[in-house]
Image: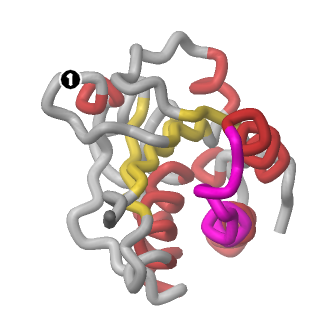
């Protein structure tokens, strides 16, 4: 029997940088095998995706059509995709009271420094986005290499928490 793709939601406060990067990256990394379907959302979404998010994805040749900043409420509705994993990528979102996700997905905190908060020159801001991209890329490679069908819930939770401590 074929398993449906695992649905993964990346959460951040503004849903304009880190969570969008993670959504696009996971969908790109697993496009061939369709094991995962990534989404992103925010507790207080911005009106637009940060321009340097799109620039970073473009530089790394990651498709970004259709990405948008959206509320996490979209994923708590009855007709929302059934989530298997929910990862917070910012400390603020990790401290907020999240909606109740149908199906009780596995959760972990994968905090990444906010590139949108980077100050300084445009080059410094681009470096901050590249650092966030590299951190997320490393974590997602570890995540996608897990043999999910071979891990019990406790072992999987331990692995997910460990991945959240991985830098690039």
Q: Position of residue 43 (x, y in %)?
A: 42, 25
Q: Position of residue 162 (x, y in %)?
A: 84, 47
* Residue 110 can be seen in this image: no
* Residue 15 can be seen in this image: yes
Q: Which corner quadrant holds the C terminus? A: bottom right
> Outermost residue, left direction?
79
At horizontal 32% and vertical 58% (from top left) the residue drawn is 4
At horizontal 78% and vertical 42% (from top left) the residue drawn is 155
Q: Nearer the viewer, residue 149 or 131?
A: 149
Q: Quadrant of residue 62?
A: bottom left
At horizontal 57% and vertical 34% (from top left) the residue drawn is 106
User: Is 135 displayed left or right of 80 in the figure?
Assistant: right
How many marks can you see?
1
> Outermost residue, front direction?
1
Q: Which residue is mark 1?
A: 77
Magenta segment: does it hold 82?
A: no
Q: Quadrant of residue 102?
A: top left
Q: Position of residue 164 (x, y in %)?
A: 77, 47
User: Is 74 displayed left or right of 54 in the figure?
Assistant: left
- For the record, the magenta segment spans 140-152
User: Is 22 displayed left or right of 67 in the figure?
Assistant: right
- In this picture, is 67 found above or below 116? below
Q: Nearer the viewer, residue 49 or 119?
A: 49
Q: Quadrant of residue 109?
A: top right
- In this picture, is 3 found above or below 103? below
Secondary element at image label 1: loop
Q: Main secondary structure of the magenta part?
A: helix
Q: Which corner quadrant holds the N terminus? A: bottom left
């Amino acid at each position: 029997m074929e398993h449906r793709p695992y649905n993964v939601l990346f959460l951040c406060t503004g849903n304009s940088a880190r969570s969008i990067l993670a959504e696009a990256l996971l969908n790109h990394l697993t496009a061939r095998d369709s094991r995962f379907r990534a989404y992103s959302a925010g507790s207080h979404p911005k009106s637009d995706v940060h321009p340097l998010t799109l620039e970073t994805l473009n530089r790394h040749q990651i498709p970004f059509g259709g990405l948008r900043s959206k509320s996490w409420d979209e994923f708590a509705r009855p007709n929302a995709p059934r989530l298997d994993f929910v990862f917070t990528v910012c400390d603020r979102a990790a401290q907020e009271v999240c909606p109740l996700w149908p199906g009780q997905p596995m959760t972990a905190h994968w905090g990444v420094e906010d590139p949108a908060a980077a100050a300084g020159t445009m080059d410094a801001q681009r470096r901050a986005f590249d650092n966030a991209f590299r951190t997320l890329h490393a974590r997602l490679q570890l995540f996608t290499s897990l043999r999910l069908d071979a891990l019990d819930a406790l072992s999987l939770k331990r692995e997910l928490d460990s991945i959240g401590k991985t830098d690039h």
